């Protein structure tokens, strides 16, 4: 994500971290590096000058708090000021609500409706969609296809009906649902007829949230779009899409933040689960290669929802040294449920340094391991020590792999088992249980 932007920022931070001492000339040099990095990230030049002046002033004039070195204090200032230009995020509450999605053509609005529905669905909410875009060809069919993928109902696709009539019918039809998401029409620009239609829909739906969807690749233009929509209908939040492959993402984030519109989520891929809660500090941490363990833990808890007690028992059992291939299989299933491996690696400190080829190879290896374990008997899964030469050959034939692949799995299992044994001391157990919110 924003790889070059992140590398440039990382380089500036490293200069401070590795310097024998921090003086005026180093601060000025680092500020120049930060300016270049922000401009590379498509951040508005006047905002770049404003934030760089603030960094320089604070770094040269502020005294570090007690117990903090000058170097640590300057790094803290850099982190705080860079986070501040990305704005404060906000999350949608977990309650019964109506959400109206707005935006221009081609911004990813319809796909984002599905992603948002999936997000609420995973939290146990009953979600429905209304297709109120009557202008774009096949708009209903696109939303219906997405709805089918995530198994939520959709209303719309009725010829001759006005958008507000479809919304009214949908609200009545889905009155028992917790969350109703309305996909509205877009235009190439914010025209009067679009504003009038949005206002009519809003007066009927009385939405709790009016969310603007913007493609991050528009960069600094995102701020102008957010401002125009806000003046027209009063948006309550912004979702930035396509943050996984744009060099202009920094510009879009900072531009929207300047309008005062809270960024709620960012779209980080094409998968229905690729919608992340926006948090400036976490986002910056990932750009700098420091990972984002909080988001990783949130994903793990999301996958484990409803199975917390079961997981607690399994964790206690594994930490006592009882670790079987069944436990290893369940760990892999949980990892798969957390999303693509490359996205998970981004959340780990320095995980982003792994090459795409290595990540792909690791993902293929996990898939192969699961196929191998599917070819084992219950006895073999519970007691892997009985798996010797003849069993290895039989398992390999059943899984359609070579004997060396089965041996590689068993080797990985033994490494994992040793790791689990190292966690068996009480102090380590308490620390891990607390971290994973299991005690």
Image (tube, rainbow, N blue to C red):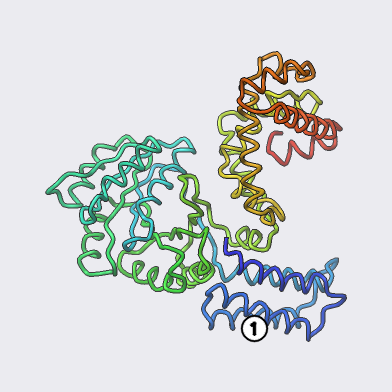
Left/right placement of residue 40 relative to residue 314 reads left
- Please, is residue 401 above or below residue 241 in the view? above
- Please, is residue 410 above or below residue 242 in the view? above
Q: Position of residue 304 (x, y in %)?
A: 59, 33
Q: Which residue is drawn at 85% across and 36% down?
A: 427
> Looking at the image, can residue 313 be seen?
no
Secondary structure under tag 1 reads: helix
Q: Which residue is drawn at 79% across and 19% down?
A: 385
Q: Where is residue 422 in the image (x, y as percent from the top left)?
A: 85, 34
The single residue placed furthest to the left in the displayed view is: 160
Q: Position of residue 221 (x, y in %)?
A: 42, 73
Q: Position of residue 372 (x, y in %)?
A: 64, 26
Near-viewer residue (383 or 92): 383
Characterize the local packing of mark 1: few (<14), some (14-19) or many (20 or more) Cα atoms within 10 angstroms. some
Which quadrant holds the C terminus?
A: top right
- Please, is residue 242 above or below residue 74 in the view? above
Q: Which residue is drawn at 56% across and 29% down?
A: 306
User: In terms of image quadrants, where is residue 62?
Assistant: bottom right
- The residue pinned by badge 1 equals 53
- Please, is residue 115 above or below residue 195 in the view? above
Which quadrant holds the N terminus?
A: bottom right
> Looking at the image, can residue 428 be seen?
yes
Near-viewer residue (100 or 269): 269
User: In terms of image quadrants, where is residue 61?
Assistant: bottom right
Left/right placement of residue 69 relative to residue 59 reads right
Q: Residue at x 29, y 69 (%)?
A: 189
């Amino acid at each position: 994500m924003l790889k070059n932007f992140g590398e440039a920022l990382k380089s500036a931070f490293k200069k401070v971290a590795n310097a024998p001492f921090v003086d005026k000339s180093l601060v000025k040099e680092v500020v120049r590096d930060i300016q270049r990095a922000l401009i590379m990230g498509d951040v508005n030049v006047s905002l770049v000058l404003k934030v760089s002046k603030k960094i320089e002033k604070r770094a040269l004039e502020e005294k570090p708090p007690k117990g903090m070195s000058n170097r640590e204090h300057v790094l803290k200032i850099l982190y705080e000021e860079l986070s501040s230009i990305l704005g404060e995020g906000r999350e949608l509450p977990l309650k019964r609500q109506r959400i109206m999605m707005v935006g221009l053509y081609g911004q990813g609005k319809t796909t984002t409706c599905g992603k948002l529905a999936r997000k609420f669905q995973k939290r146990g909410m009953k979600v429905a969609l209304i297709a109120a875009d009557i202008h774009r060809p096949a708009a209903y069919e696109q939303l219906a296809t997405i709805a089918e993928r995530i198994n939520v109902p959709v209303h719309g696709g009725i010829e001759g009906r006005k958008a507000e009539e479809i919304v009214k019918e949908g609200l009545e039809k889905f009155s028992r649902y917790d969350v109703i998401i309305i996909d509205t029409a877009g235009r190439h620009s914010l025209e009067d007829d679009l504003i009038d239609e949005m206002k009519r829909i809003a007066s009927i739906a009385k939405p709790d949230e009016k969310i603007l969807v913007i493609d991050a690749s528009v960069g600094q233009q995102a701020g102008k779009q957010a401002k125009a929509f806000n003046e027209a209908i009063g948006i309550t939040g912004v979702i930035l899409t396509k943050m996984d492959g744009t060099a202009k993402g920094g510009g879009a984030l900072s531009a929207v933040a300047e309008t005062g519109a809270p960024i709620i989520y960012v779209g980080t891929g094409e998968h229905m689960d690729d919608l992340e809660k926006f948090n400036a500090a976490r986002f910056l941490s990932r750009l700098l290669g420091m990972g984002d363990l909080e988001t990783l833990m949130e994903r793990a808890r999301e996958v484990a929802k409803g199975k917390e007690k079961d997981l607690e028992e399994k964790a206690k059992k594994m930490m006592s040294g009882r670790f079987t291939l069944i436990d290893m299989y369940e760990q892999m299933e949980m990892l798969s449920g957390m999303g693509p491996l490359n996205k998970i690696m981004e959340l780990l400190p320095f995980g982003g340094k792994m090459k795409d080829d290595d990540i792909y190879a690791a993902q293929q290896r996990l898939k192969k391991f699961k196929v191998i374990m599917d070819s084992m008997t219950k006895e073999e899964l519970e007691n892997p020590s009985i798996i010797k030469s003849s069993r290895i050959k039989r398992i390999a034939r059943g899984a359609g792999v070579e004997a060396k692949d089965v041996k590689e799995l068993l080797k990985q299992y033994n490494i994992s088992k040793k790791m689990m044994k190292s966690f068996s001391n009480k102090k380590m157990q308490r620390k891990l249980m607390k971290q994973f919110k299991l005690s």
